[in-house]
Amino acid sequence: MTTEERYRAILRNHLPSEAVDWVYGYLDCYKVHFHITRERQSKLGDYRWIQPQHNYHEISVNGDLSPQMFLWVFLHEAAHLETHLKHPSARPHGHEWQSEYALLLRQAIGFFPADTQEDIILYTSRIPLSRTLGRRIEEHLRGDSSLALHLDDLPAGSLFCLKRKPDMLFRSVVRRRTRWLCTDVGTGRSYTVSGSAEVEMKKNFAN
C-alpha cells in the first residue's frame, strides 16, 4: 500500500466516503500537515499557519466526531487557512473568515446528509452567519437532541459542568467572541470554553 493509499484509508475512517477524495485533494494542494487527535474538551479542531519556525499549514480535528461533524469541523479550520492566505490581518472569526467558511460549505454541500443541506444553504446565504442556525446544524450532524444545553444558553455567573467532563465544576465569567472565560471552582484556575460546549447547569449557591 502506498503512502497515499494509507492516507486515504485513514480519511475513510473519519469522513463521509464521498468526501475523501475532495479532502485529500485539498490537503495535498496546500501541503497541509493534518492530524486526527483524541478528544479535546476545549476545542474540536485547530489551525496553525505558516511561520518562520513552523513552515507549513497544520490542521487538526478530533477523531471522536461523527463523519459529518468531522467534515464540518475540517471545513471550519480550512476556512482559517483560506482567510490567513487572503486576509492575514483579519480577526479569527470575522466577516472574512465567515465568507470563506460559507464558500467551502457550499462547495462541499453534497457531502452532507440531504436533510441538512437546506439548512446549510440558508446558513451560508448571508454574512454574518447565524449562530443559532449553525448550532442547529451541528446538533443534527452530531445526532444530539435539540434540547441539548450549551454554555451560550446560560447567563454569565452560572455554575456548570461540561457534559463530557462532569467531575469538574466551573463558573462562567464573561463571553469573548465564541468562547467564555470560566473559572474552575475547585482550583480557581481560569479556562476558556467554547460557547457551543454541551453543559449541565448546577444550582448556584451564595459565596
Image (tube, rainbow, N blue to C red):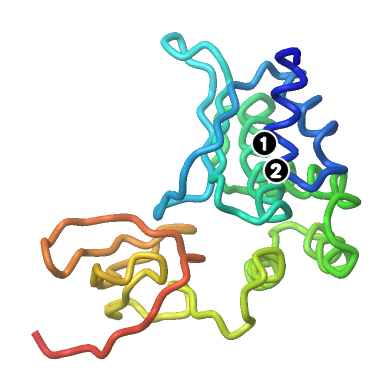
Q: Residue at x 54, y 44 (%)?
A: 45
Can you say which quadrant of the picture contains the C terminus? bottom left
Q: Residue at x 75, y 17 (%)?
A: 4
Q: Are marks 2 and 1 in contact (CB under 8 Å)?
A: yes
Q: Position of residue 147 (x, y in %)?
A: 58, 85
Q: Residue at x 70, y 64 (%)?
A: 141
**Number of labelled discs?**
2
Q: Position of residue 104 (x, y in %)?
A: 79, 42
Q: Is residue 79 left or right of residue 60?
A: right
Q: Is residue 64 left or right of residue 41?
A: right
Where disc 2 sits, the SS reads helix
Q: Residue at x 74, y 19 (%)?
A: 28
Classify residue 68 by image quadrant.
bottom right
Q: Position of residue 108 (x, y in %)?
A: 85, 45
Q: Which residue is mark 1?
A: 78
Q: Amino acid at mark 2?
A: Leu
Q: Which residue is mark 2?
A: 75
Q: Amino acid at mark 1?
A: Ala
Q: Nearer the viewer, residue 22 or 8?
A: 8
